[in-house]
Image: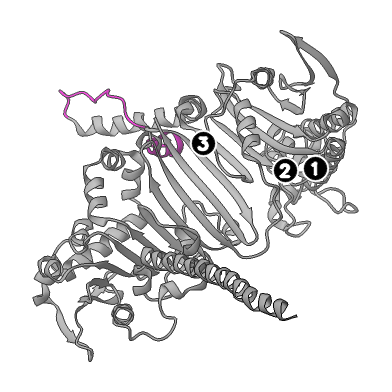
Amino acid sequence: MIEQNRRRRFARPRFSRSRLIVIIASALVVCAGLLVYARAVRETKGAYALANDLPRGALVYAQCADLPALVKRWDESTLKQQLVASTSFQQFETHHLAMKLVERWSEYNDAFGFTLDAGALAGASQSKAAIAIYDIGRLDLVFVAPLSEEQSAAANFFTHTDAFDEVSLPDGTTYYRREADVDNGREHQVLAFAWARGRFVLATSERLLLRTLANINGRAPEKDRLADDPAFQTLSRELAPHFATVWVDQSALNRDWYFKSYWVQQNIEDLQILRAGLFDLELQESKWIEHRRFLLSGQTTKQTPLPTNEAQRLAALMPKDAPYYKVRALTNDDNAAHTLRDTLFDRPPQDDTERGPTWSWHSYDDSDFAEAGDNESDYGSGYEYLDHSYDRLIDDPVDARLQANDTRYDGELRAATEARHVAALAQALQPARPLYAATSASPQVNAGPLFVEFRRAAALTLAAPARFDRAAFERALSALAQSRLTIADSTAALQWTDGAHDGQTWRTLDLPMLGRQLCYTLDGRELFVSNSADMLHALSAAHEQTDVHADLDATPALDELTVVRLDRRAQGFDQVFARLDAQCIKAYWAERRGKEHDKQDETSAPTNAPHPSEEFFSGNIASLLNVAARVRAVEIRRSHQPNRLREEVALIFN
């Protein structure tokens, strides 16, 4: 017993020492984790340090890692020269918005007494800089940048203080202010600037300047910093800034009148789902990457991830001459049916449920109610000669109403019919369980009246290809095509036939009157469907080449990949819109040369030099594509998470 107790006494320290070592090791791990976390917090806070200076409530916030370098790079770039010389920029200069901005900036310059441009702002910053916009209409903004006291003394702002009122705050901070009437005297603003604790601050609102100085001096009310915004905190933790970063409060922008009126894409309804967004531009040697992070306003539909190897495999199948393709995971069979519908056919009929009354006086005029004469044969029957009312009334959405006991318009009937056929197509595809889809489009310009043909194709990856029901698929697809080509609910039948070439076999559905066709083939797990036999052959040929690799970087799982090949611009854009705009361009320059000739004396001749197009697509948009001539392709990767949307947009250079 004594010996056992002695052993226990000597064994106890050995046990305690081992336990102590484990505790110490665990503590070290925890401390290391805390240190790493603290460092990450400091780095993140430092990365967005200027957001701590700016007041909360900004609609848009932008920061740059090195403003002087950016200004210098921009001034010396050919990109700037090409943009300024572009048709798009020259047309924008004449627009109301541009003229208002130039007018407002000129009024600011008059108030400051010197030119307030990018060079002046760059001279007031060491490297980093940020700007926040709080009111678009009044152009209320704040600019803040780290700046040493010596540099501030040499900045343009502090060499022109004689024209400003000097104001001293109780904490010793001094700022300079000047009142200005802007917008042709309709608005009154106070322009102000200051230097405080190594920060230069410029504002077009005295109230915003004072709030910024309070943040810098540590006297601000609680949670009055932009960095305190919960949405900003969430997104800034997820995205490390690079060259330039922009934050937007999309919910506030969606309510702003100026944003809704001047937003170029006019798709405000599509933006309602977005609460906030953070965009970051990373410059690499061969490409620029824009990292996008969004907070969504509600729960999104659960997305099926698209594995990297599947994205690369499907991308490799796309025709090399196709200017556009998209690869994505499918959420359900109905999604696959809609994918085929949208790929093979034009835009679906619109079901306009917001109709007016079933009958309207405005559809008619007095002649529609005139009585026939006694001798109607002298003038012919009422329908022998069709006047202007014929075309107008037959296309009038009110007059084209179906019978009084019918509750739908013809367009509504077509939409309902198509929905039934799409559901049937989804049911036909269901046993084969479509997983992923790749779609591609390639315009081809022809010499005939139908001068452009949009060749399109889709590749569906099936989880159970052996269960693919060909008969049901063909019935559903032909019914869908039939609803687009003939009268709604017509019973006219279209016939599928076999085709074969170079060892490839496929099924074809000829579409009467249009000289077009639909075709498909099942090759292993892939169901290829197209409105062009050439594209179908290209997909099948690519599928047989085991050494084909997509020109894509390895990426984590995503939901969707979209690629626009700008090196195929001539085929996909220029040729099409040059034909569309040809007559307008010819008439415009004929009129322009005529006016120029009238201004010249009789001995001079009008110039015959080629002129750029002034049309929207062949002129404005084409000039922007010229500016981006170095960009070979644009790749957009998208993935959804609960209440989140992530996008990576890469501009690949030649």
Q: Amino acid at mark 1?
A: Asp
Q: For residue 377, what is the image quadrant? A: top right
Question: What residue occupies the far bottom of the structure in this picture?
Answer: 170
Highlighted range, magenta: 601-624
Which residue is located at x 22 percent, y 67 percent? 107
Residues 616 and 561: in front is 561
Question: What residue occupies the far front of the structure in this picture?
Answer: 2
Question: What residue occupies the far top of the structure in this picture?
Answer: 502
Residue 578: horizontal and vertical position, in percent? 46, 27
The numbered disc on residue 330 is 2
Q: Is 182 drawn above or below residue 457 in the view shown?
A: below
Residue 36: horizontal and vertical position, in percent? 46, 64
Residue beneath disc 3 = 553
Q: Does residue 411 appear left or right of residue 297 in this picture?
A: right
User: For the residue labelled by badge 1, is the local secondary structure a helix, a strand or a loop?
Assistant: helix
Q: Does residue 399 appear left or right of residue 610 in this picture?
A: right
Which residue is located at x 54 percent, y 50 percent? 647
Q: For residue 523, what is the image quadrant? A: top right
Residue 613 is one of the magenta-drawn residues: yes
Q: Is 106 drawn above or below residue 314 in the view shown?
A: below
The tag earlier along the polypeptide, 2 or 3, is: 2
Residue beneath disc 1 = 333
Which numbered disc, 3 or 1, marks the residue closer to the eye? 3
Q: Amino acid at mark 2?
A: Leu
- The answer to whether residue 306 shows anywhere in this view is yes
> In the picture, which quadrant includes the N terminus?
bottom right
Which residue is located at x 59 percent, y 24 percent? 319
